[in-house]
Image (tube, rainbow, N blue to C red):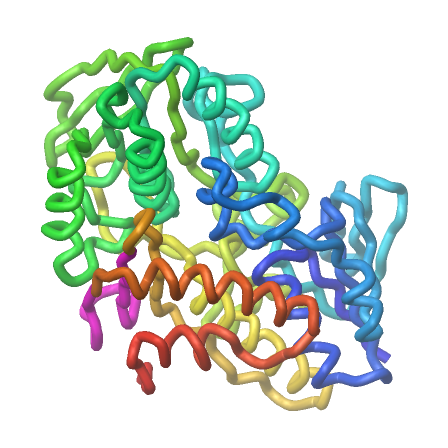
Amino acid sequence: MAHIVVLGAGIGGMPAAYELKAKLGAQHQVTVVSAVDYFQFVPSNPWVAVGWTKREKITFPVRPFLEKKGIGFIGSPVSRIEAEANTVHLANGDALHYDYLVITTGPRLAFEEVPGAGPTDGFTQSICSVDHAEHTWEAYQRFLDDPGPVIIGAMPGASCFGPAYEFTFILNRDLRKRRLRKKVPITYVTSEPYIGHLGLGGVGDSKGMMESEFRNNDIKWITNARVTKVEPGKMFATEVDMAGNPVKEHELPYKFSMMLPSFKGVDAVAKVEGLCNPRGFVLIDEHQRSPKYPNIFAAGVCVAIPPVEATPVPTGAPKTGYMIETMVTAIVDNICADIAGEKGTAKGSWNAICLADMGDSGAAFVALPQIPPRNANWMRKGKWVHYAKIAFEKYFMYKMKSGSPEPIFEKYVLRAMGIERLD
């Protein structure tokens, strides 16, 4: 009997566990290990941060749903991985032996790279976790009593820009509904070389469309911005040209700020010799497998993917839900093949597909593949995206509770966009 340990119970880890159990059956053991005992639908965090939805709508305890499918669960952070000994050591003192390890931990949020950043020890808010989104909602409520300048954006090295754009438009819409928008100048500060870059070198006419939306909504922006430090009520950023040379120093006042941090690999994974790149992201081959440790696989934000292009201020490439789903399916197929004594040949798809909410409208982005040149490269805007994302949240939560291994993004999101083939 093989024992497969899955690290992480998020958008990658839960489907991985369900698919593995569905294909391997009772003769093999699947155990999920997570630092928290609940699933959170991270794409809905911007709504939590302005009070449009509540924590209980986008989270649920994972243990009963996993155990119902015969999947073990341990709620404890990982303290150390002995890859040579095929053993995971947990903070609760447990040690798990594995035959295969699937890493879907997501990232570590590297707030420390910019002094004064972050919701715990700094002065900026975050929507990267539901805990952070709730903290942001608390700060936002205080801000509403005494509104003023707002700064939203992404720090140097950030790789997931969609939520920053979403939060900008959602906040803009919420302030308009409250009749407070005239009191709140909004500035978008980003490491991207231009608005709509998204870490993807742009998608279709994303540059023109996002700039137009910013202008139409009185949102100012600073691109090629290297935020250097944050103080209470003031953010410092160096704006550079396309050669990386400083052209302007900004001291930006704010009363409320949400800035996405750069990502790194979680410590226990990053410390495994030969497993990760210098930022702590797991090195994988085209089959999602570690080149050094052939029984270790990884999917999602924790994997090492090169930037789409070099930018004056460092930016990373995003890992979207569809991409993660295909990575997970490839891992499951390859582990099953390995157990059967066959060679695993399945590959994940590095295609970027995103539904971005804009408050009362939205934008859909499709980059196939993520790294140019592309077979498909377009964006669409409309109210349908806003409603599609609301519907998808409900459906995704239902599927994670039901334990179905059926691919969700491919069957429903792509068809909603009118895409039938990705090859």
Of the 4 image quadrants, the one containing the C terminus is bottom left
Q: Position of residue 292 (x, y in %)?
A: 59, 62
Residue 270's place in the image compared with 378, above or below, is: above
* Figure quadrant of residue 27: bottom right
| Above or below, 267 relative to 420 | above
**Quick check: is 363 in the magenta stretch?**
yes
Along the line of sight, the residue nearer the viewer: 256 or 109: 256
In x, y percent, where is residue 190? 26, 34
Which x, y percent locates residue 358?
A: 30, 49
280 up-or-down from 188: above or below: below
Dominant secondary structure, magenta: strand
Residue at position x 39%, y 13% in the image: 146
- In terms of depth relative to the viewer, which is nearer, 68 or 327? 68
Q: How many marks?
A: 0
Seen in the image, is 100 located left or right of residue 109? Answer: right
Q: Which residues are magenta?
A: 362-379
Whether residue 111 appears in this view of the structure is yes
User: Which residue: 24% across, 12% down?
Assistant: 251
The residue sitting at 22% across, 23% down in the picture is: 182
Residue 248: quarter of image: top left
Q: Is residue 48 left or right of residue 20?
A: left
The structure residue drawn at horizontal position 66% and vertical position 64%, both measured from the top left corner, is 14
* Residue 226 location (% of width, % of height): 27, 26
111 with respect to 68 (left or right): left
Quadrant including the N terminus: bottom right
Is residue 115 visible in the rendered image? The answer is no
On whether residue 6 falls in the magenta region, the answer is no
Q: Is residue 152 left or right of residue 9?
A: left
